[in-house]
Amino acid sequence: MNIKKLTPFEKSIIIDKGTEPPFSGEYNDFFEDGIYICKLCETPLFSSISKFKGHCGWPSFDSIIDNNVKQIPDKDGIRTEIVCANCNGHLGHVFVGEGFTDKNIRHCVNSISIVFVPIKHS
């Protein structure tokens, strides 16, 4: 597994399970064709096809790539945390039943936890 060196801010989110301020991340209003990979280990996590405007301040996706994102109970006892299934890097939280898309699920992700890789069109 290729683990990247993180800045102190990246570590505070990805390792220490923090949350970046809403509407501050580079991918909140970003809608280009490609995939989003884990910043820590480069595992493919989300496709731009599943990204939608969640109006919550963080990038929102209604599906994951393969089984590369896992859900675990959050330490707050209320929410469900999502992490990279490969390296356990903190991504954000998942919410069900909000009705934003037909899939009725929102993976709410910290921009700092992911990296966008554009699709190369020929």
Image (spheres, grey):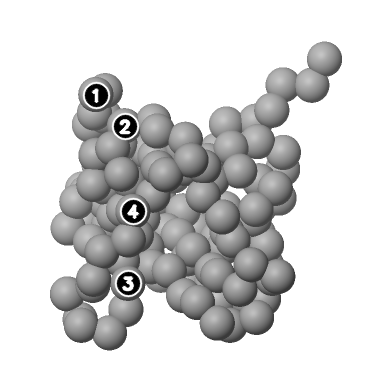
Q: Which residue is mark 3?
A: 80
Residue 13 can be seen in this image: yes
Residue 3 in which image quadrant: top left
Q: State the separation of the CA atoms marked 4 and 1.
A: 17 Å
Numbered mark located on residue 91 in the image: none
Q: Which residue is mark 4?
A: 70
Q: State the separation of the CA atoms marked 3 and 1.
A: 25 Å
The answer to whether mark 3 and mark 2 are in CB contact below 8 A is no
Given the image, on which type of amino acid does mark 2 rest?
Cys
Given the image, on which type of amino acid does mark 3 rest?
Thr
Which residue: 26% across, 47% down? 89
x, y percent for residue 87: 24, 39
Q: Is residue 22 left or right of residue 75?
A: right
Q: Earlier in the sequence, mark 3 or mark 1?
A: 1
**In the picture shown, does residue 7 fall above or below 104?**
above
Which residue: 21% across, 56% down? 12
Q: State the separation of the CA atoms marked 4 and 3.
A: 10 Å
Numbered mark located on residue 1 in the image: 1
Given the image, on which type of amino acid does mark 4 rest?
Lys
Residue 58 can be seen in this image: no
Secondary structure of the residue carrying numbered label 2: loop
Q: State the separation of the CA atoms marked 2 and 1.
A: 6 Å
x, y percent for residue 78: 27, 84
Secondary structure of the residue carrying numbered label 1: loop
Q: Looking at this rendering, what residue extends furthest in the right direction?
A: 122
Could you classify mark 3 by the number of other residues whose Cα lies within 10 Å: few (under 14), some (14-19), or many (20 or more)? Answer: some
x, y percent for residue 38: 39, 39
Q: Earlier in the sequence, mark 4 or mark 3?
A: 4
Q: Which residue is mark 2?
A: 41
